[in-house]
Image (cartoon, rainbow, N blue to C red):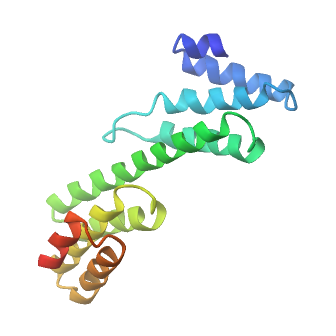
Amino acid sequence: AFAYYSARQYDDCIASAKRYISLHPGSAEAPYAQYLIGASYFDQIPDVTRDQSRTEKAIQALDELNRKYPNSEYAGDARKKIEMARDQLAAKEMSVGRDLMQKKNFIGAINRFKVVVTQYQTTRHVEEALLRLTECYMTLGIVQEAQTAAAVLGHNFPDSKWYKEAYDL
């Protein structure tokens, strides 16, 4: 599996590592095999304009590593990769939301920005998502929801450049 990973033959690496885990689930190398699966998916994460199924698979594989082998030497790196992958998924939602805003589909944009705020709370995209929610609600004339989004932004990120824009709105 490592040889395939080193050669960037990720599908072969994943298949070999999965086979190893199924044959030797309790071995000392099982956490490493699980890590190779997650790292193989992680290394194939595309830019935010592309399908993010590999990103989701990376999160699942790395999360499984943390569940099954929380004390392994690979768990810390897996947690970092999970956070980066979650940030990628939030960036995808933001990209689609911005595109929907430009097309004047404010309800669709609101739904995308809400996903960022509710499912990806620890990512760097939450501040902008709250601003974009404020913008969409104001455009639709839903002032109370706009004020709520701006208040959440101000409460959680008082020094943010996004908050200053929301406050001006």
Residue at horizontal 75 percent and vertical 42 percent from the top: 71
Residue at horizontal 22 percent and vertical 78 percent from the top: 137
Please state the horizontal and vertical placement of residue 77, each as a whole percent of the image: 58, 37
- The answer to which quarter of the image holds residue 114 is bottom left
Q: Nearer the viewer, residue 28 or 41?
A: 28
Please state the horizontal and vertical placement of residue 36, each as a whole percent of the image: 63, 26
Name, please, the residue furthest toward the bottom. 144
Q: Would you place residue 27 above or below residue 140 in this image? A: above
Q: Quadrant of the C terminus?
A: bottom left
Residue at horizontal 34 percent and vertical 36 percent from the top: 47
Name, please, the residue furthest toward the left. 168
Residue at horizontal 53 percent and vertical 42 percent from the top: 80
- The answer to which quarter of the image holds residue 126 is bottom left
Residue 169 visible in the shown view = no
Residue 55 visible in the shown view = yes
Q: Quadrant of the N terminus?
A: top right
Q: Nearer the viewer, residue 141 or 88?
A: 88
Please state the horizontal and vertical placement of residue 136, each as a whole percent of the image: 21, 72
Count the labels in the image.
0
Q: Would you place residue 122 above or below residue 81 in this image? A: below
Please state the horizontal and vertical placement of residue 138, each as a whole percent of the image: 17, 79
The reply, left or right, for residue 166 in relation to residue 63 is left
Q: Would you place residue 14 above or below residue 79 in this image? A: above
